[in-house]
Image (cartoon, rainbow, N blue to C red):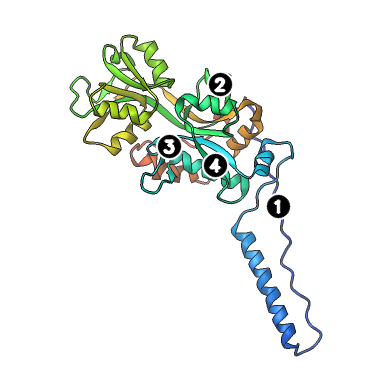
Amino acid sequence: MDQAQSFAKPLHTAPFSKPPETATMYPSIHRVTHFLACIALACTATATTLAVAAAPVFPPDSTMAKIQKRGDITIGVHYDVPLFDQKNPLTGKLQGYEIDIANQLGRDLFGSDGHVKFIEAPGPVREQFILQHKADLILATYTITAARLKTVAFAGPIYEAKQAIVVKTDNKAFGKTIPDFAALNDHSVCVVSGSISNVLLLKVAPKAKIMALGNNPDCAKAVRQGRVEAFATDDALLIGFVNETPKEIRFVDNAGGDEQPYGVGVNKDSLDLCRWVNERLLDMSKDGFLDKSFGATVGTVIKRKPEPLKATDMKYCE
C-alpha cells in the first residue's frame, strides 16, 4: 500500500505590527483619524485571515495544484440516494453523508467553501466519468471491487455495505431475512444495470427474473407498483427508501451477505490525489467529522456505527 503523504505546507501570514508612535503628545485630528483608519484596516485583515483557513500549498506539477489553479474540484455524486447523496426536492440542494465528505474535501483543498462542482454520476457511467476526466472524484455509493480496481483507483473505504432486498409490506414470500441471494431464484427482482447486485444475481441466482433499470428510485418504484417482487442492492440504500415510504415497502436482511466497502473513485493517473484524499479521510475520522455526519444522515436509520478508519485499510491507491 502507498502510505498517505503530507503534501500541504502551511502558509504564514505576517504578524500584526503596531504603527509607530507619533512624536507629539497631542497629534493633529488628521493624524488621529489616519491612525484609527490604519488600525481598522489591520484588524479587518487579521479577522479575515483567521476566519478563512489558508489553502494548502502543493508541488506545482501535482494534481491538487492543477485543480486549485482551475478554481474548483469536480465531484460526481448521485442525486437520488437517500441519506448518502440526494437532491432535496424542496430546496434543490444536495445533502447526505457523501455530500458532507465532498464539501469537506473542497474546504481542505481550497481553504474555503464554494469550490466544489457537483455533477450527477449514475451507476453505469461512474467509471466512464473518471476515465474521461469528467470528474476528479466519484463519491456515489461506489463499491470497491477487484474488477473496478483494474481501471480506477479508490481512496477509502468510507463505509461497509451489505447486499439485501426490499419487498412490498404485504409480501408473503419473504420473511424478515433470507439466507442468501440464492433465495431469489424464481422470483422477479429489480437491480440497477451494471451494479454489484446485477452481477451477483446472475452468478448466484441464475433463475431469478431480473429487471435491470437505470437507477435506484425506479427499482423502488417498481416494487411499490407490484411490477417486481423485490429490489436488490446495498442495505444502506434500501433502508433509505424504506424510510421514505415505510407503509409501502419493507426491508429484508440478507444473512449471507458479505460486507462491501464504498470508496472514492479516482483516476489511476492521479494517484497523488488519491493519497491526499486518504490523508484527509483519516483526519476526518480522527476529529469526529465522519462520525458526526454519519450520525446525522445514514445513522438515523442504520444503527451500526462505522469503524474508525485505519491507514492499513486504505490500500486501493494503485
Circle 3 sits on which residue?
Answer: 79
Give the labeled residue for mark 1.
Answer: 11
Q: Which residue is mark 4?
A: 117
Amino acid type for the residue under numbered disc 3: Tyr
Q: Residue at x 18, y 27 (%)?
A: 170
Helix, strand or loop status at disc 4: strand
Q: Which mark is residue 149?
A: 2
Is disc 3 surrounded by few (<14), some (14 to 19) or many (20+) residues within 10 Å? many
Packing grade of label 2 (10 A; few <14, some 14-19, many >=20) is some
Whether 298 is drawn above or below 174: the answer is: below
What kind of element bears circle 1? loop
- Left or right: where does residue 288 sit relative to residue 174? right
Quadrant (top left/top right/bottom left/bottom right) for the N terminus: top right
Query: Does any portion of residue 93 appear in the rendered image?
Result: yes
Among the two numbered marks 2 and 3 on one chain, the one whose residue lies closer to the N terminus: 3
Cα separation, mark 3 vs mark 1, equals 36 Å
Of the residues shown, which amino acid type is indicated by label 2? Answer: Leu
How far apart marks 4 and 1 lie (CA) works out to 25 Å
Of circles 4 and 1, the one toward us is 4
Residue 20 at what x, y percent from top left?
A: 78, 76
Tell me how far mark 1 sits from mark 2, CA to CA: 36 Å
Q: Which residue lies most toward the right here?
A: 23
